[in-house]
Image (spheres, grey):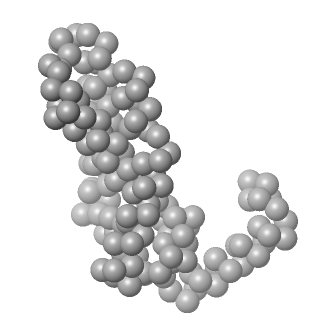
């Protein structure tokens, strides 16, 4: 079960999915890498739902297709872990698509304005000057 949790919550899924999303939005919506990074660090943030979905899909693919082992007995530890992971995935999916449908937030990233680029330039120059620890100071 530890392997399943590590596979799903591994930072590599975040990196792999971020690269795939960045290339897709560049091809489909002509959003460059700097704008993608601005969206990741900005108020809108980065949706980790896609990497969580990729990790869960990968884990279930190996479990059901390659190993072809029966799933866990009801009320066992493995069954409970997968029920909790499925519940978290459902909650993440609900939040992602609810925010998209109700609040109009994009599912991946959105176009950057000139003001976004200027804010990013000010932010990065401040971080370079003051250091990364200065971000958390008030």
User: What residue occupies the far bottom of the structure in this picture?
Assistant: 114
**Residue name at image x 85 percent, y 65 percent:** 130
Depth check, front residue: 19 or 113: 19
Total numbered circles = 0
User: What residue occupies the far front of the structure in this picture?
Assistant: 66
**Residue name at image x 82 percent, y 62 percent:** 131
Residue 59 visible to the viewer:
yes
Judge left or right: residue 92 versus residue 125.
left
Judge left or right: residue 26 versus residue 32.
left
Depth check, front residue: 116 or 20: 20
Q: Quadrant of residue 23?
A: bottom left
Residue 55 point in image, percent of width and height: 34, 42
User: What residue occupies the far right of the structure in this picture?
Assistant: 130
Q: Quadrant of residue 28?
A: bottom left
Give above or below for 77 relative to 34.
above
Residue 47 visible to the viewer:
no
Quarter of the C terminus within the rendering? bottom right
Residue 5 point in image, percent of width and height: 40, 30
**Residue name at image x 59 percent, y 83 percent:** 117
Give above or below for 109 relative to 10.
below
Residue 50 point in image, percent of width and height: 34, 53
Residue 123 point in image, percent of width and height: 70, 73
**Residue name at image x 29 percent, y 36 percent:** 59
Quarter of the N terminus within the rendering? top left
């Amino acid at each position: 079960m530890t392997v399943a949790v590590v596979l799903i919550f591994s930072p590599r899924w975040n990196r792999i999915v971020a690269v795939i999303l960045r290339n897709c939005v560049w091809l489909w919506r002509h959003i460059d890498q700097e704008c993608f990074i601005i969206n990741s660090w900005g108020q809108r943030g980065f949706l980790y739902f896609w990497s969580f979905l990729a990790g869960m899909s990968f884990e279930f693919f190996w479990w059901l297709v390659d190993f072809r082992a029966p799933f866990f007995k009801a009320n066992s530890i493995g069954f409970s872990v997968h029920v909790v992971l499925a519940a978290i995935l459902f909650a993440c999916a609900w939040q992602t698509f609810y925010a998209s449908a109700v609040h109009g937030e994009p599912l991946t990233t959105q176009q950057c304005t000139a003001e976004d680029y200027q804010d990013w330039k000010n932010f990065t120059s401040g971080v370079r000057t003051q250091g990364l620890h200065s971000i958390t100071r008030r």
